Amino acid sequence: MEKHIQQTNDRLQCIKQHLNNPSGFQSAARELLEWCSDQRAFQLQFEDSLMGCLTVVYKVASQPGYDFDLGYRLLAVCTSHKDLFSPKSASK
């Protein structure tokens, strides 16, 4: 189980890097959107990595070269699962 958690967190870090780049944003955001459609994505073990990705989306989605609508959809999906986040993350 620990290996799965580490692999998932590593993948989220990779997604975060791609989200920072206009050429990688769409595919990374789509992968993250699909992943976040499953409630298991919001487990505490993944929360810090997921919040890192969402912070990047929040900061860059409205910039030229990025997909604002896709970023908005991703943030909306995660907001709809706000009750699954820890109180600290849910307040962000």
Image: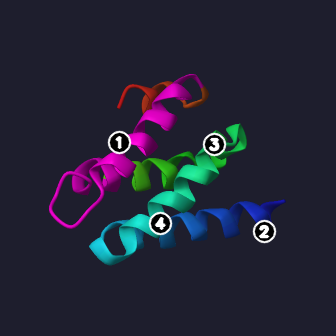
Q: Amino acid at mark 2?
A: Lys
From the image, tell me which residue sits under label 1: 72
Question: Percent position (x, y) of residue 65?
Answer: 21, 67
Question: Percent position (x, y) of residue 80?
Answer: 52, 26
Q: CA distance from mark 4 to mark 1?
A: 14 Å
Q: CA distance from mark 3 to mark 4?
A: 14 Å
Q: CA distance from mark 3 to mark 1?
A: 14 Å
Span shown in magenta: 56-83
At a point 42% along the width and 56% down the height, the residue shown is 53
From the image, tell me which residue sits under label 4: 28
At a point 33% along the width and 53% down the height, the residue shown is 57
Location of the C terminus (image quadrant): top left
The answer to whether the residues at label 4 and label 1 have Cβ atoms under 8 Å apart is no
Graded by Cα atoms within 10 Å as few (under 14), some (14 to 19) or many (20 or more), the crowding at tag 2 reads: few
The residue tagged with tag 4: helix, strand or loop? Answer: helix
At a point 38% along the width and 74% down the height, the residue shown is 24
Dot placed on the residue nearer the N-terminal end, 1 or 2 = 2
Q: Amino acid at mark 3?
A: Ser
